[in-house]
Image (cartoon, rainbow, N blue to C red):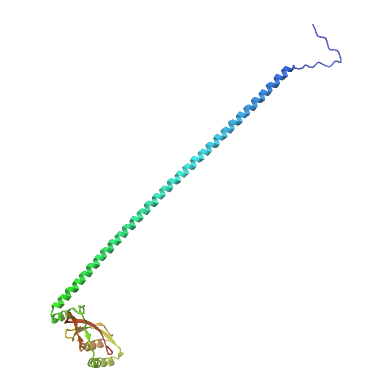
Amino acid sequence: MKPPEPLPGDPPAVETEPPEAAAIIDSIEAAVQDSIAEAARRDSIAAARRDSIAVARRDSLEAVRQARIAAAARRDSIAAARRDSIAAARRDSIAAVRRAAARLDSIAAAERDSLVVAALRDSLAAVARRDSLASPETALERLRTAGPEYVSYDEGARLVWDTEAEALLATTLLPVIRAEGLDADVTTNLWLLVRSNGRVEATVVQTSSGNSTFDSVAGRAARALVFAPALRDGRAVPIWVLREVSLLMR
């Protein structure tokens, strides 16, 4: 059957959906929104996880780098300490060797000095034995030939000074001092070979007065001096004596 025609002036009829369809649409839209929200949440969780993994990886790499740096520093420190220890040991070893060498040198020097002293002592003892066994004339001849040298004695020669000796010295030296225009205190040092009888056998200039004439006359004047002779083992022996000869000598 054909539906009736609408009358003029009536509003057109509006088609409406049934309530069940609208509910279904709303449910679908809600499900879609939930699905979108769930996907967004999963994406957020995944992004957070990726960020966390990246941060952890970076921290791990930085920790590894720091550990490598620390290990390298530790190795360098150990190597430096080993080098310092070796250098210190080498220095100590060198110092010990030097100390040992110095000690050996000191011992060797002491031994040499001891040998020299022993040889000198033996030489002096031999000379003393020879002099003691020799006659005064033989010893005097040897001393005259050898010149001024040390002779062992128990008591040295002593000048016997009296007015006669003083007068003799004055009358010998004073004319030369006046003739040469010398100072009254001019002196010369002479080695005097004193015989076992106290007389002067020979003279040798040790320090000149600066005037050869005075030195020569002083030597002649000294030949007139008399000494108490030197003694060794109770015997008079010849000996060289160093004296200053001057007009004012005592």
Task: Please name the residue shown 72% across and 17% down the image.
Answer: 20
Q: Residue furthest top?
A: 1
Q: Residue furthest front?
A: 234
**Numbered disc total:** 0
Quadrant where the image shows the C terminus: bottom left
Q: Residue at x 65, y 25 (%)?
A: 34
Residue 165's place in the image compared with 58, above or below, is: below
Question: Percent from the top left, x then y, of residue 105?
Answer: 28, 62
Q: Quadrant of residue 173?
A: bottom left
Residue 215 occupies quadrant: bottom left
Establish if 84 lies above or below 48: below
User: Which one is in front, 133 or 51?
Assistant: 133
Query: Picture coordinates of residue 28 (x, y %)?
Result: 68, 21
Residue placed furthest toward the right:
9
The residue shown at (20%, 86%) is: 227
- What is the quadrant of residue 154 in the picture? bottom left
128 horizontally vs 174: left or right: left
In the displayed structure image, the side of residue 55 where residue 4 appears, left or right: right
Instruction: Write the residue at 15% across / 76% down.
Output: 130
The x, y position of residue 37, in whole percent, is 65, 27
Image height of 220 relative to 32, above or below: below
Q: Quadrant of the N terminus?
A: top right
Q: Nearer the viewer, residue 18 or 173?
A: 18
Q: Position of residue 5 (x, y in %)?
A: 83, 10
